[in-house]
Image (cartoon, rainbow, N blue to C red):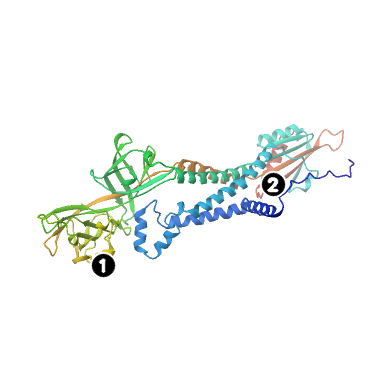
C-alpha cells in the first residue's frame, strides 16, 4: 500500500430490509432519543412536576382522614382527583411510567459516559502542542537552570497528573467534575431503585388510637383504619407487636402553632415488654417497622341513658377542621331504646349524635370555631338524631359522621335544636332520655410503616449531593511545559508554559500563574 492509498473502511453489519429494516430504524431512533441527556433532563423535570400533587393533595397512604376531609370539603372535585390517582400519586401507574422511563434513560446516558470516563482516567495527558503561545494562557521562564524532572516534581506536588516526554511535560487535573457528574446520575438511579424496592417490598398501616390503657392494637391488617401491602409482602410475615397508647401530650405556642406532640406507649411482642415515648420528629423504631406520629385530636365521651333507663357510654374521635383543632364527628348508639320486656330492637329508635367540638370555645355565640387548640374552655355543640342509622344494611360507612342518605330520606330525624354542652352537662331529650357530655380523651394518628428502600434512598441522596458539588466546582484543565536551549553552548534554557481550561473556569488565569510561579521556584 502506497502513501497515497487509503485503507478500506470495514464492512458495515448487514441491516434488515423491508418492514424489518423500517422497524429497526424506528426502534434505534427512539432508543437514541430516549437515552439522550436532553430527554433525561425532560423526564427528571416531569418527575418533579408529577410529585407536586403528592405534596399538595392529601395522600391516602399517609393520612386517610385528611382524604376523607377533602371529600367533605370538595364533594364534586374529589371523585375526579381519585380517578387520576391524585390521592395516591406515588403509587399511580402514570408516576411509575415516568420514573421507569427516567431510569432507562439514565442507564442509556450514563453507561457510555462511564466507559469514556474510565478510558480518560487511564490515559495519559496528551502531547504538548507545537505552538504554546496560541493557548489561552501563556508564559515563559527565562534562564531556567533546572531540568524537566524539576518541572514534573513541582506539578506532582500540586496534584497534577503528569506525563514527561523528552524535554516536555503535559499535566492535567479536574476529573472530579465528570466523576461527580457520574456519581450524581448513578445516585439518581439508586433513588429510583429504592422507590421500587419500597413499592414492592414495603407496607404501611394507619390507625387512630385513643389514649388510655384500655385502647391498643396489634400489627394486623384487620386492626388498621387503612393499610396497604406491597405485591411481594406476605401478610402472615408482618412483624408481631402490640402497642398501647398510654398517654398523649400536646403543647402549643401562644399563637396556637404546635410546639411538641409526644406520645407515651407500651410495646409488647417486639422483645421484652417496654414503655417508651416518641414524637413527630422522633419515631418509634421497632424490629421491621417504624411508628410515626402524624397528628392528634380529641375524642369526646358521651353517656346516653335511653327511655328504658339503660346507660351506654361511648367515645368517638372527632376530626379537626382547622389549626385551632375545631373538630367534627359523630357518636352512634344503635342498641339504644331496646325494650327490656321483649328484647326487641326498634331501628326507628336508634340514636346518633353529630357534633362540633371546640377545645377553647368563645364566650359568646356563634360557637362554630375554636380560639386555641388546647382545652382552655372546652365545649361541644351537639345535635341529636333519632331513627334508623343505616348500620344494619351491611354497607360500610364512615364512623366520623352520620349517614347523610338516611337523613335526607327522613329515616333519621333531628331531635330538637342543637345544644351547647360543657364537660359534665346533661341534656334531656323529648322522650325523657338523657345524654351527658362526660369529657374528652386525646387521640393520636399513627402510621406504621416499613420501607426497605429508605436507607438506600438516604445514602443515594447524600452521594447525589456530594456528586453535584463535585460536578459544579470541579474544573478540568491542562498545562504544558517545554524546555528549550537558546544555543548548544548555553547553560541556561528557556521554559515555555501554556494553559488550557477544558471548561468555563474564570479563575484559571490565577491558578496558571501560581503554577508557573511554583515551577520557577524549582530552578537551581
Place of residue 443 in the rendered image (x, y in percent of width and height, measured from the top left): 28, 50
Quarter assignment of residue 418: bottom left
Give the camera-side residue of 421 and 511: 421
Image position of 337 (left or right of 253): left
> Which residue appears at 13% of the width and 60% of the height?
433
Give the camera-side residue of 221 and 114: 221
Image position of 27 (left or right of 458): right
Q: Which callout, 1 or 2, points to the residue nearer the camera?
A: 1
Give the camera-side residue of 311 and 410: 410
Sequence order check, earlier mark of 1 and 2: 1
**Quadrant the C terminus occupies:** top right
Place of residue 158 in the rendered image (x, y in percent of width and height, measured from the top left): 66, 37
The answer to whether residue 81 is above or below residue 96 is below
10 Å crowding of disc 2: few (<14), some (14-19), many (20+): many
**Quadrant the N terminus occupies:** top right
* Residue bearing the label numbered 2: 501
Q: Is residue 417 visible?
A: no
10 Å crowding of disc 1: few (<14), some (14-19), many (20+): few
Between marks 1 and 2, how big is the CA–CA gap?
Answer: 80 Å
> Which residue appears at 44% of the width and 55% of the height?
55
Place of residue 400 in the rendered image (x, y in percent of width and height, measured from the top left): 28, 57
Give the camera-side residue of 502 and 460: 460
Report the label total.
Answer: 2
Q: Is residue 119 visible?
A: yes
* Residue bearing the label numbered 1: 409
Quarter assignment of residue 72: bottom left
Q: Secondary structure at mark 1?
A: loop
Amino acid at each position: 500500500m502506497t502513501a497515497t492509498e487509503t485503507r478500506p473502511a470495514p464492512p458495515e453489519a448487514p441491516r434488515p430490509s423491508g418492514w424489518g429494516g423500517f422497524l429497526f430504524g424506528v426502534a434505534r431512533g427512539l432508543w437514541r432519543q430516549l437515552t439522550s441527556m436532553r430527554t433525561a433532563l425532560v423526564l427528571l423535570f416531569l418527575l418533579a412536576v408529577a410529585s407536586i400533587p403528592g405534596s399538595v393533595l392529601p395522600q391516602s397512604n399517609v393520612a386517610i382522614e385528611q382524604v376523607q376531609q377533602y371529600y367533605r370539603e370538595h364533594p364534586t372535585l374529589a371523585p375526579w382527583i381519585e380517578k387520576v390517582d391524585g390521592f395516591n400519586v406515588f403509587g399511580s401507574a402514570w408516576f411509575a411510567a415516568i420514573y421507569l422511563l427516567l431510569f432507562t434513560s439514565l442507564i442509556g446516558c450514563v453507561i457510555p459516559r462511564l466507559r469514556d470516563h474510565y478510558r480518560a482516567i487511564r490515559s495519559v495527558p496528551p502531547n504538548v502542542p507545537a505552538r504554546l503561545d496560541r493557548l489561552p494562557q501563556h508564559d515563559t521562564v527565562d534562564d531556567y537552570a533546572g531540568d524537566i524532572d524539576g518541572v514534573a516534581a513541582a506539578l506532582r506536588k500540586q496534584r497534577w497528573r503528569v506525563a514527561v516526554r523528552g524535554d516536555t511535560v503535559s499535566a492535567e487535573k479536574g476529573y472530579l467534575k465528570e466523576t461527580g457528574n457520574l456519581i450524581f446520575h448513578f445516585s439518581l438511579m439508586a433513588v429510583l431503585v429504592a422507590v421500587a424496592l419500597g413499592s414492592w417490598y414495603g407496607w404501611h398501616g394507619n390507625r387512630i388510637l385513643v389514649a388510655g390503657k384500655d385502647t391498643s392494637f396489634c400489627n394486623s391488617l384487620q386492626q388498621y383504619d387503612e393499610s396497604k401491602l406491597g405485591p411481594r409482602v406476605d401478610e402472615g410475615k408482618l412483624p408481631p407487636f402490640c402497642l398501647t397508647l398510654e398517654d398523649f401530650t400536646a403543647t402549643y405556642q401562644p399563637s396556637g402553632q404546635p410546639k411538641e406532640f409526644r406520645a407515651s406507649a407500651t410495646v409488647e411482642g417486639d422483645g421484652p415488654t417496654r414503655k417508651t415515648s416518641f414524637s413527630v420528629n422522633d419515631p418509634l423504631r421497632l424490629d421491621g417497622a417504624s411508628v410515626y406520629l402524624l397528628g392528634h385530636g380529641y375524642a369526646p365521651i358521651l353517656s346516653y341513658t335511653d327511655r328504658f333507663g339503660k346507660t351506654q357510654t361511648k367515645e368517638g374521635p372527632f376530626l379537626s377542621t382547622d389549626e385551632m383543632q375545631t373538630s367534627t364527628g359523630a357518636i352512634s348508639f344503635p342498641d339504644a331504646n331496646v325494650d327490656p320486656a321483649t328484647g326487641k330492637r326498634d331501628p326507628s329508635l336508634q340514636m346518633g349524635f353529630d357534633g362540633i367540638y371546640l377545645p377553647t370555645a368563645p364566650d359568646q355565640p356563634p360557637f362554630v370555631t375554636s380560639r386555641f387548640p388546647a382545652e382552655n374552655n372546652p365545649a361541644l355543640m351537639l345535635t341529636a338524631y333519632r331513627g334508623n342509622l343505616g348500620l344494619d344494611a351491611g354497607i360500610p360507612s364512615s364512623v366520623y359522621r352520620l349517614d347523610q342518605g338516611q337523613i335526607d330520606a327522613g329515616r333519621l330525624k333531628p331531635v330538637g335544636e342543637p345544644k351547647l354542652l360543657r364537660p359534665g352537662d346533661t341534656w334531656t331529650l323529648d322522650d325523657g332520655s338523657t345524654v351527658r357530655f362526660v369529657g374528652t380523651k386525646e387521640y393520636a394518628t399513627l402510621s406504621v410503616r416499613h420501607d426497605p428502600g429508605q436507607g438506600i434512598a438516604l445514602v443515594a441522596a447524600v452521594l447525589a449531593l456530594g456528586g453535584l458539588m463535585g460536578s459544579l466546582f470541579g474544573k478540568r484543565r491542562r498545562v504544558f511545559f517545554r524546555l528549550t536551549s537558546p544555543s548548544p553552548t548555553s547553560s541556561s534554557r528557556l521554559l515555555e508554559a501554556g494553559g488550557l481550561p477544558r471548561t468555563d473556569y474564570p479563575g484559571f488565569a490565577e491558578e496558571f500563574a501560581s503554577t508557573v510561579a511554583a515551577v520557577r521556584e524549582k530552578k537551581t
